[in-house]
């Protein structure tokens, strides 16, 4: 597989494995840890719900939209632009993930390449301690405990969804999962995002392209054809 990769990507992958991947790294273990950790937090939060009212259930769609927006903004800005104090995100994403995988080399060589896709455990703890727990406490203080736990449930479910989808996009395009047209078209959006010329401008949602659509950064192949069509109309030859 590695031999058919563009030389630049192959060389970067070798460099990444040597210098950025822990020597005893195991991709399956990493994936299982992320899933089990998020699932445990999700199940614990579910066990804390008590007599949820109709209004409180609205927390789920609201948190879903909020999470979609956070996914979009964090990806569009600190992950693609070097911002002071958040340079680690830029380095891990724009400088590593986008060099490890390009439009012409989207696929993992093996499960240990999960390292270049999944959130490292220390970042998961960082977000849990500095974002999820404070947000939950503020919500519990300002609203109700049920709302705080529904927020946590949706946030952890979103995180699981994000990691699974992003991992799937970097599997072979012949994988059975792409028999589902829905997954195929989501992967296509991410494939365009891995085009070096487009990555800083389009398709920042990894899961559902709601914010991309809202902010005009949604891109799929037809758009280019539409644009050519419009250009022809505006400037006839
Ligand atoms: Zn990717
Ligand atoms: Zn990106």
Image: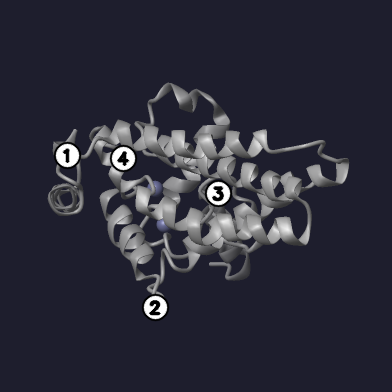
Q: In front of the other: label 1 or label 3?
A: 1
Q: Quadrant of residue 69?
A: bottom right
Residue tagged 3 = 222
Which residue is at 31% across, 50% downward? 102
Query: Sequence-wise, which precedes: disc 1 or disc 3?
Result: 1
| Discs 3, 4 touching: Cβ within 8 Å | no
**Which residue is disc 4 drawn over?**
114
Q: Comparing marks 3 and 2, which lies closer to the viewer?
A: 2
Which class describes the residues within 10 Å of circle 3: few (<14), some (14-19), or many (20+)? few
191 or 94, nearer to the observer: 94
Asked if marks 2 and 4 touch (Cβ < 8 Å), the reply is no
* Position of residue 130 measured from the top left corner of the image (x, y, whole percent): 50, 62
Residue that label 1 marks: 24
Q: CA distance from mark 3 to mark 4?
A: 31 Å
Q: Nearer the viewer, residue 48 or 10?
A: 48
Q: Is residue 91 left or right of residue 64?
A: left
**Element on which disc 4 rests:** helix
Disc 1 to disc 4, how far (Cα)? 13 Å
Give the foreground label among 3 and 4: 4
> Most extreme residue toward the bottom, as rendered?
84
Evaluate whether residue 227 shows in this view: no
Per the image, label 2 sits on a secondary structure element best described as loop
The residue positioned 52% from the left and 44% from the top of the image is: 159
């Amino acid at each position: 597989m590695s031999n058919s990769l563009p030389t630049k990507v192959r060389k970067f992958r070798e460099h990444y494995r040597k210098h950025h991947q822990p020597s005893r790294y195991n991709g399956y273990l990493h994936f299982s840890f992320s899933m089990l950790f998020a699932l445990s937090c999700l199940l614990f939060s579910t066990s804390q719900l008590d007599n949820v009212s109709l209004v409180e259930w609205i927390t789920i769609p609201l948190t879903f939209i909020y999470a979609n927006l956070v996914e979009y903004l964090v990806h569009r800005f600190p992950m693609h632009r070097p911002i002071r104090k958040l340079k680690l995100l830029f380095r891990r994403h724009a400088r590593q993930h986008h060099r490890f995988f390009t439009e012409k080399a989207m696929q993992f060589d093996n499960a240990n390449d999960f390292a270049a896709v999944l959130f490292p455990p220390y970042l998961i703890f960082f977000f849990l301690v500095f974002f999820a727990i404070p947000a939950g406490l503020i919500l519990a203080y300002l609203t109700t405990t049920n709302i705080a736990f529904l927020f946590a449930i949706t946030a952890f479910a979103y995180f699981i969804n994000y990691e699974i989808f992003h991992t799937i996009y970097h599997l072979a395009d012949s994988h059975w999962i792409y028999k589902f047209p829905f997954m195929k078209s989501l992967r296509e959006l991410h494939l365009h995002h891995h085009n070096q010329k487009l990555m800083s401008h389009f398709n920042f949602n990894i899961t559902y392209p709601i914010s991309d659509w809202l902010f005009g950064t949604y891109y799929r192949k037809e758009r280019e054809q539409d644009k050519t069509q419009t250009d022809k109309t505006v400037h006839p030859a």
